Amino acid sequence: MVVTNQSFPIHQPAASGILLVEDDLLVADAVAGGLTEEGMSVTVARDGLTGEELLARDEWKLVILDWWLPGRDGLGLLENLRRRGSAIPVLFLTARDAVADRVRVLNAGADDYLCKPFAFDELLARVRALVRRSVKSETIRLEFQDVSADLIARKAWRAGHALELGAKSHELLMYFLRHPGELLTRRQLTEDVWHEPYHPASRTIDVHLVELRRELEAYGPRLIHTCRGHGYRLAVHPSE
């Protein structure tokens, strides 16, 4: 999870994540933490100006907007987004529950509206529905050799065997499957999969690579190869 506001450097996440624009620290942490535990990639902006900048930089799978925000309100962000012709799904998450407010937001182009306080299970169901809608026109299955993954069901297989992977190891596999044959550096993996600054001494990647390789190699030869001093490559042979 990446948190950005005026006191944090802005990080550009990989496309297809969720942007949460929410200034309430407790709500932002609870929503982002819960969605992250469900295996989703979440970036948090705690003011409207940061949210506007992030919206201009990336194509998101979903945007979750609060109404009242420092700098620029959520309705203004929504109106600008639709004015640019963007069809990114938008879920409004706000304490304003009057019918007139809901009508105003939906007429401005929001796809859904959830009032605070809310049950996280309901939020999760709405998020999943909107994300499914946003990927209808995209490939929902990735494949390389005898490895395949379903992006909607968040499941992966090798040679027909289901892989038992933690959320982050699953994301790591998805990243490799999107970049077959490419040399992927540790910095690239850290920034694009973990959405964190790169620290050479960190062993986080190693831990998840061990888990990922153990699952993959239980059903076939090694496919994720180490290119010493350079990074990693998904390939049949290391030199490919």
Image (cartoon, rainbow, N blue to C red):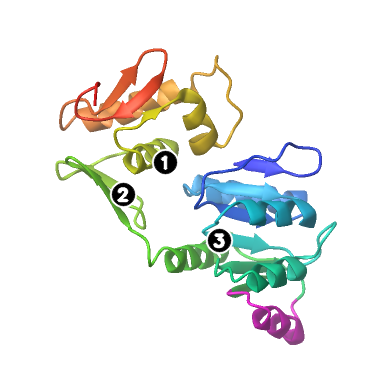
Which corner quadrant of the image does residue 88 belong to? bottom right
* Mark 2 vs 3, N-terminal side: 3
Residues at marks 1 and 2 touching, judged by CB atoms closer than 8 Å: no
Determine whether the residue tagged by mark 3 lies in a helix, strand or loop.
Answer: strand
Q: Residue at x 33, y 58 (%)?
A: 139
Q: Residue at x 70, y 40 (%)?
A: 10
Q: Farthest right residue?
A: 71
Q: Residue at x 76, y 69 (%)?
A: 76
Which residue does the numbered mark 2 point to in the structure image? Answer: 155
Which residue does the numbered mark 3 point to in the structure image? Answer: 62
Magenta: predominant secondary structure element? Answer: helix
Q: Which of 44 and 26 is in front in this view?
A: 44
Q: Residues within 10 Å of mark 3 (few under 14, many from 20)?
A: many
In the image, residue 22 lies at what x, y percent? 73, 56
Determine whether the residue tagged by mark 2 lies in a helix, strand or loop.
Answer: strand
Q: Which of 97 and 1 is in front in this view?
A: 1
Q: Residue at x 68, y 63 (%)?
A: 65
Residues at marks 2 and 3 touching, judged by CB atoms closer than 8 Å: no
Please state, as top left, top right, bottom left or bottom right, where the N terminus lies in the image. top right
